[in-house]
Image (tube, rainbow, N blue to C red):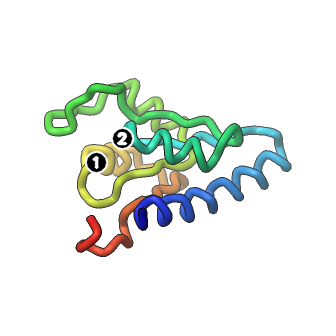
Amino acid sequence: MRINTLLLIMLSLVGMSCAAANERDNTKINVGITLQPYYSYVSAVVGDRANIIPLVDPGFNPHNYLPQPKDMQRLEQMDVIVVNGIGHDDFAMKVISAAQRDDLIVIKANKDVPYSLR
């Protein structure tokens, strides 16, 4: 429950910035996700104010994942990406690093969750 609360707080901040951006130019931001379960959380927070883009196709194997050109193209479309932040999606951090996107906001959803709650 605490993890979900922390994620909702962080994504609420993103959602507020989405609302401000929508008022200015009527465009949606693109929020990336690394793991399919985050689709539900992110979509619940941002609603129709953002597009949600998975970094990789469903059913991929994170243990032997190699970035594909389409994954890099999806990453280039993202304004924000939500990662697990505790090692479940280390593959994504390598892709993000390789993209050299200083403007990409990376939300580590579980970063500040105490180890005893993980």
Upstream in sequence: badge 2 or badge 1:
2
| Image quadrant assignment for residue 63 | top left
Q: Position of residue 73 (x, y in %)?
A: 46, 30
The furthest residue to the left:
64
Residue designated by label 2: 35
Q: Residue at x 54, y 49 (%)?
A: 80
Residue designated by label 1: 89
Cα gap from disc 2 to disc 1, whole angstroms: 7 Å
Q: Residue at x 66, y 54 (%)?
A: 15
Judged left or right of residue 61, residue 18 is: right
Q: Residue at x 59, y 40 (%)?
A: 30
Q: Amino acid at mark 1?
A: Asp
Q: Nearer the viewer, residue 15 or 91?
A: 15
Circle 1 SS class: loop
Q: Amino acid at mark 2?
A: Leu
> Residue 22: which numbered mark, if any?
none
Would you place residue 94 above or below residue 11 in this image? above
Q: Nearer the viewer, residue 114 or 50?
A: 114
Q: Quadrant of the N terminus?
A: bottom left
- Label 1: how many residues lie within 10 Å, few (<14), some (14-19) or many (20+)? some
Judged left or right of residue 10, residue 50 is: right
Q: Residue at x 47, y 39 (%)?
A: 39
Q: Position of residue 62 (x, y in %)?
A: 21, 38
Cβ–Cβ below 8 Å for labels 2 and 1?
yes
Q: Quadrant of the C terminus?
A: bottom left
